[in-house]
C-alpha cells in the first residue's frame, strides 16, 4: 500500500474523522465555486466595478487553480498528501481573509488569485487521502459517503451564499471559510494518517506549470480587455508548453495520453461543454439579480434544481454508461442542456420563476446529470488503469481552463460592456446572445461525442470510481484518485 501506517475501518472513530476532514476540505473549494457567483452583483455594487471587474473575481481564482492543480497533486504524492492538504487549507483560509477585507476590486482580485493557489493544493488531496486511509473493504462505502455529503454541500452552496449576502454582507461569504478551514486543519492534523505515492519519482515539472499559468494568464488578460497582443502571447506560451511537455522526462501532462482517440474525444467534449457551463453559471445569477430583480437568496434558490438533479441522477447516469457505453448520454446530455439554455431566453425583467426560470433550469440540470458521469467514465476507461488518476486530473484541468477562458471571452462576444451592468434591458440583450453562444458550444460537444466516442462499448469502471458517484461540482469533473491509492 502507499499509506504510511495502517488503514482504518470506516465505522471506527478515526475512520469517521477521516471522512469529516476530507468532506469539509473538498466542500471548502466546492462551495466557493457556487457561493461567490451569487455574491457578484453585491460585490460589483459595493466596490463600484464593472463586468470586467467581476470577470476577474471569478477568473483570478480559476486561473491559479486550473494552472496548478496537476502540480499540486504531484507535490502531495511526493511530500505527503496530508501535509500538502493542510498547507492548502491554511493558504486558502488566509487568502479568504484577504478577500473579506479587500477595500477595492484590485486587492480582491489579487486575493482571489492567492485563494486559487490554496484550492489547487487542497483539492487533489481530499479523495486521495480518503482512499489511502480507509481499509480496502470499506473504501467503496467511504467514497460513496464522501460523494454524497460533498453533493449536499454543492447543492446548498447557492442557497447559503444568497442567504449570507442578503442578511449580512458579501464579505462574510469569504470570512465563513475561516472557521471551516480551522476545523479541517485540526481534524486532519490529529486524525488523518499521512500517505504518499511510492511510485512517484523524478523532478516536478515546475517549468511546465509556469508556462501553463503564464499562457492562461495572458489569454485571460487579453480576452477580458479585448487586447490581441496578450492573446497571441498566450498562444505562443501554450505552444512552448506543448514543446516542454513533449521533451520532459516527468511531464505534467503526459503527451502519450493523447494517443487514445477516446481520451482526445472526451477532452474535446469537455472543452466545449465546460466552456458553456462557465458562461452560464457566471451570467445566469447576474441576469436573475440585475435584470429579473431577484434577491441574492431568491437567485440562489432559483439555481438549486440544477445541483439537486445532479445529486440524484448523476450516479445513475454513470452506471448506465457502465453497461451501455458513454456515447449515448454524452450526446443526449449536451443537447438537453442546450435546450435548457434556449428556454432560459425567457428570463428577463420581472421574469416569473415558475413559467420563465424553472423550465430552463430543470431541463439544463437534466442535461448536466446525463452528461457528467459518462464523460468521467469515458476519460477513465480511455487509458490503462494505472494512468486513470493522471488522465482524470488532466481532464479536470482542461475543464477549469475552458471555464476560465469562457468567462473571460463571453461578455465581450455577447456585447456586454461595463455600462450594461446597470441597464437591465441592455444586460438582457447580452445575456440572450451569450446563452445562444453557450447553446452552440453544447451542441458542438454533442456532435463531437456522437462522432468520436465509440458506440456500444461499455465503460468498464469499478464501483469505487468517481464515475459511479453523485457529483455536483459544476466547475469540473471529479478527480479520480490514483489506483495505487486504492490498493
Image (cartoon, rainbow, N blue to C red):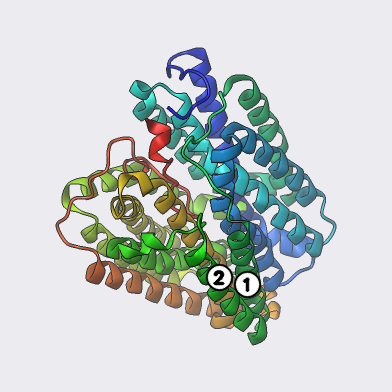
* In the foreground, 187 or 357: 187
The image shows residue 327 at horizontal and vertical percentages of 23, 60
Whether the residues at callouts 1 and 2 have beta carbons within 8 Å, the answer is yes
**How far apart are labels 1 and 2 at the CA level?**
6 Å
The image shows residue 136 at horizontal and vertical percentages of 36, 24
In which quadrant is the N terminus drawn?
A: top left
The image shows residue 124 at horizontal and vertical percentages of 53, 43
Locate residue 282 relative to residue 332 in the image: left or right.
Answer: right
- Is tag 1's residue or tag 2's residue first in the polypeptide sequence? 1
Q: Quadrant of residue 216?
A: bottom right
Locate residue 367 relative to residue 211 in the image: left or right.
Answer: left
Residue 436 in the image: above or below residue 144: below
Element type where label 2 sits in the image? helix
Residue 401 visible to an observer of this rendering:
yes
Residue 103 in the image: above or below residue 152: below
Residue at image point 72% right, 37% down: 178
Element type where label 1 sits in the image? helix
* In the foreground, 156 or 279: 279
Question: Residue 31 bears which disc, if any?
Answer: none
Residue 295 visible to an observer of this rendering:
no
Residue at image point 45% right, 61% down: 357
In which quadrant is the C terminus drawn?
A: top left
Residue 391 in the image: above or below residue 440: above
Can you identify the residue that label 2 sits on? 405
Residue at image point 60% right, 55% down: 68
Hey, which residue is sitting farthest right in the picture? 103
The image shows residue 388 at horizontal and vertical percentages of 37, 47
Residue at image point 49% right, 80% down: 433
Can you identify the residue that label 1 sits on? 220
* In the foreground, 103 or 216: 216
Hey, which residue is sitting farthest left in the picture? 456
* In the foreground, 301 or 415: 415
Amino acid at each position: 500500500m502507499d499509506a504510511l501506517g495502517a488503514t482504518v475501518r470506516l465505522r471506527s472513530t478515526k475512520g469517521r474523522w477521516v471522512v469529516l476532514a476530507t468532506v469539509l476540505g473538498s466542500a471548502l473549494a466546492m462551495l466557493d465555486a457556487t457561493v461567490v457567483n451569487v455574491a457578484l452583483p453585491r460585490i460589483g455594487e459595493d466596490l463600484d466595478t464593472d463586468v470586467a471587474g467581476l470577470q476577474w473575481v471569478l477568473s483570478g481564482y480559476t486561473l491559479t487553480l486550473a494552472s496548478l492543480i496537476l502540480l499540486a497533486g504531484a507535490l502531495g504524492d511526493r511530500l505527503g498528501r496530508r501535509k500538502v492538504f493542510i498547507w492548502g487549507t491554511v493558504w486558502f483560509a488566509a487568502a479568504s481573509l484577504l478577500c473579506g477585507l479587500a477595500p477595492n476590486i484590485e486587492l480582491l482580485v489579487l486575493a482571489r488569485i492567492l485563494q486559487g493557489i490554496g484550492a489547487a493544493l487542497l483539492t487533489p488531496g481530499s479523495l486521495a487521502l480518503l482512499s489511502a486511509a480507509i481499509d480496502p473493504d470499506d473504501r467503496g462505502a467511504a467514497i460513496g459517503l464522501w460523494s454524497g455529503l460533498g453533493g449536499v454541500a454543492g447543492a446548498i452552496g447557492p442557497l447559503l451564499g444568497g442567504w449570507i449576502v442578503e442578511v449580512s454582507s458579501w464579505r462574510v461569504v469569504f470570512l465563513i471559510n475561516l472557521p471551516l478551514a480551522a476545523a479541517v486543519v485540526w481534524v486532519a492534523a490529529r486524525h488523518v494518517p499521512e500517505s504518499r505515492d511510492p511510485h512517484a519519482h523524478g523532478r516536478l515539472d515546475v517549468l511546465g506549470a509556469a508556462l501553463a499559468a503564464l499562457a492562461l494568464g495572458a489569454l485571460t488578460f487579453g480576452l477580458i480587455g479585448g487586447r490581441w497582443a496578450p492573446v497571441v502571447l498566450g498562444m505562443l506560451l501554450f505552444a512552448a508548453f506543448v514543446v516542454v511537455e513533449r521533451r520532459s522526462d516527468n511531464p505534467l501532462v503526459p503527451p502519450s495520453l493523447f494517443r487514445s482517440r477516446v481520451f482526445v474525444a472526451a477532452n474535446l467534449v469537455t472543452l466545449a461543454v465546460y466552456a458553456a457551463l462557465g458562461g452560464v453559471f457566471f451570467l445566469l445569477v447576474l441576469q436573475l439579480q440585475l435584470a429579473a430583480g431577484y434577491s441574492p437568496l431568491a437567485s440562489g434558490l432559483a439555481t438549486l434544481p440544477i445541483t439537486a438533479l445532479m445529486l440524484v441522477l448523476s450516479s445513475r447516469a454513470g452506471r448506465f454508461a457502465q453497461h451501455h457505453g458513454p456515447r449515448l448520454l454524452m450526446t443526449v446530455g449536451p443537447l438537453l442542456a442546450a435546450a435548457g439554455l434556449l428556454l432560459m431566453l425567457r428570463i428577463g425583467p420581472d421574469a416569473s420563476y415558475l413559467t420563465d426560470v424553472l423550465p430552463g433550469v430543470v431541463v439544463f440540470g437534466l442535461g448536466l446529470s446525463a452528461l457528467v458521469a459518462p464523460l468521467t467514465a469515458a476519460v477513465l476507461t480511455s487509458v490503462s488503469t494505472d494512468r486513470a488518476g493522471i488522465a482524470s486530473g488532466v481532464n479536470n484541468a482542461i475543464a477549469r481552463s475552458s471555464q476560465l477562458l469562457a468567462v473571460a471571452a463571453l461578455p465581450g462576444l455577447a456585447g456586454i460592456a461595463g455600462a450594461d451592468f446597470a441597464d437591465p434591458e441592455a444586460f438582457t440583450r447580452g445575456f440572450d446572445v451569450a446563452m445562444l453562444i453557450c447553446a452552440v458550444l453544447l451542441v458542438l460537444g454533442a456532435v463531437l461525442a456522437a462522432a468520436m466516442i465509440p458506440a456500444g462499448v461499455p465503460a468498464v469502471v469499478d464501483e469505487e470510481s468517481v464515475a459511479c458517484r453523485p457529483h455536483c461540482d459544476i466547475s469540473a469533473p471529479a478527480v479520480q484518485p490514483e489506483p495505487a491509492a486504492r490498493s
